[in-house]
Structures are given as structure tokens and as C-alpha cells.
Image: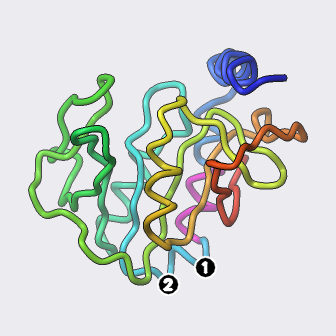
């Protein structure tokens, strides 16, 4: 299967996930107790839409003990900005919530990136929305990469190309 076919197939599967709140809670607990997250100084994390693994609860929890930054697309580049609360977000690129703050992350030492994906392969490659923002970011910055997805979207199929960068670990329900 080609990437676009996999993207469409797993977006549909993800949209129809049963017991989403229950599965989100399992993933939440795995993330907040993850060794790399616990040891990190900075957590980069996407702001989920209704179909993705919920990150709002994760963000709210991490804000108590970590520096948290979320992505913003600027001139076709993904940058991360620190936030102090969920209230620091407004709708931006593709109607995704983005930071309104201006303190950009400039150093990525001891940083974990919680990474979205429509699906992930068992070899830890991801299919996102096809714009390549995360792959370009990972090509420039060395951070520990954790992918989040539902078990139904964690697949055996191989689909990576030379531009794809795998995550270091995948957390599922």
C-alpha cells in the first residue's frame, strides 16, 4: 500500500476508535510515567484534534513540572514555543491550536518530543499528514522522539522513504 492509501485507511480507523477516552487514559498514564519524559527538562508536544490521541490532559499535567512547548508553523517551518497554560493557544495553521506566546525554544538539550501520527510501523516510522514538518524538524534537532497512536494504528506494513525519520519509541493503548 502507498502512503496516501495508508493515510486514508488509518484516518478512518482512528476516527472510529471505540472507547477512546479509556484508551487515551491508558496512553496518558504511560506518557506521564515514561522514563525519558520524567528525566527530560523540556517536552515538545502537539495539541491534539478530536481524532488524535488526546494530549490536552498530558499537557496540563506536564505544565506542573516541565517546560512545555507546542508547535507553530511559520513560513512552512515548524517551530516550538513554550506555553504556561492551555489558554496560551489559539487556532492557527490547518485549524490546529498553536501558541500565542513568543518564547521560542532555542536549545533542545534533554528534550523529548511527543509526536503525532496517523499510524506508526513496528519499525517506528510514522505517517503524518504529508507535509513533512516533523521529519524536517528531526533532521535538524536531536531530541528523543515518542510517537503516540492507538494499537489499531500500530502496523506491520513498511512504508518509509529516504526522508522519513523514525521515532525512538511508540506508546499505544
Q: Secondary structure at mark 1?
A: helix
Residue ranking furthest to the front: 162
Q: Identify whether 36 is placed above or below 29.
A: below
Relative to 73, 140 lies left or right: right
Q: Position of residue 137 (x, y in %)?
A: 44, 56
Task: Please provide the residue range marked out in magenta.
Answer: 26-33
Q: Position of residue 17 (x, y in %)?
A: 69, 24
Per the model, the C-alpha gap separating discs 2 and 1 is 6 Å
Residue under the image location 36 percent in, 73 percent down = 42
Relative to 139, 8 lies left or right: right
Q: Position of residue 50 (x, y in %)?
A: 47, 25
Residue under the image location 38 percent in, 42 percent down = 47
Q: Identify whether 96 is placed above or below 105.
A: above
Q: Nearer the viewer, residue 164 or 63?
A: 164
Q: Quadrant of the N terminus?
A: top right
Residue under the image location 33 percent in, 75 percent down = 65
Q: Position of residue 48 (x, y in %)?
A: 43, 37
Label drawn at residue 93: none
How crowded pointer 2 is (Cα within 10 Å; few <14, some 14-19, many 20+) is rated as few
Residue under the image location 65 percent in, 37 percent down = 127
* Residue underneath mark 1: 35
Residue 151 lies within the magenta run: no
* Residue underneath mark 2: 39
Secondary structure mostly taken by the magenta-highlighted segment of the chain: helix
Q: Identify whether 44 is placed above or below 159.
A: below
Amino acid at each position: 500500500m502507498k502512503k496516501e492509501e495508508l493515510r486514508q485507511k488509518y484516518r478512518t480507523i482512528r476516527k472510529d476508535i471505540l472507547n477512546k477516552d479509556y484508551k487515551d487514559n491508558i496512553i496518558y498514564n504511560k506518557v506521564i510515567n515514561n522514563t525519558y519524559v520524567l528525566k527530560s527538562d523540556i517536552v515538545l508536544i502537539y495539541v491534539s484534534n478530536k481524532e488524535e490521541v488526546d494530549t490536552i490532559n498530558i499537557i496540563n499535567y506536564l505544565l506542573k513540572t516541565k517546560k512545555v512547548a507546542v508547535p507553530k508553523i511559520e513560513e512552512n517551518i515548524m517551530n516550538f514555543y513554550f506555553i504556561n497554560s492551555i489558554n496560551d493557544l489559539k487556532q492557527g495553521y490547518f485549524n490546529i491550536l498553536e501558541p500565542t506566546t513568543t518564547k521560542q525554544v532555542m536549545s533542545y538539550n534533554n528534550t523529548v518530543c511527543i509526536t503525532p501520527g496517523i499510524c506508526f510501523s513496528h519499525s517506528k516510522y510514522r505517517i503524518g499528514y504529508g507535509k513533512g514538518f516533523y521529519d524536517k524538524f528531526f533532521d535538524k534537532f536531536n531530541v528523543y522522539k515518542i510517537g503516540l497512536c492507538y494499537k489499531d494504528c500500530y502496523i506491520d506494513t513498511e512504508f518509509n522513504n529516504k526522508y522519513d525519520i523514525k521515532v525512538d519509541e511508540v506508546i499505544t493503548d
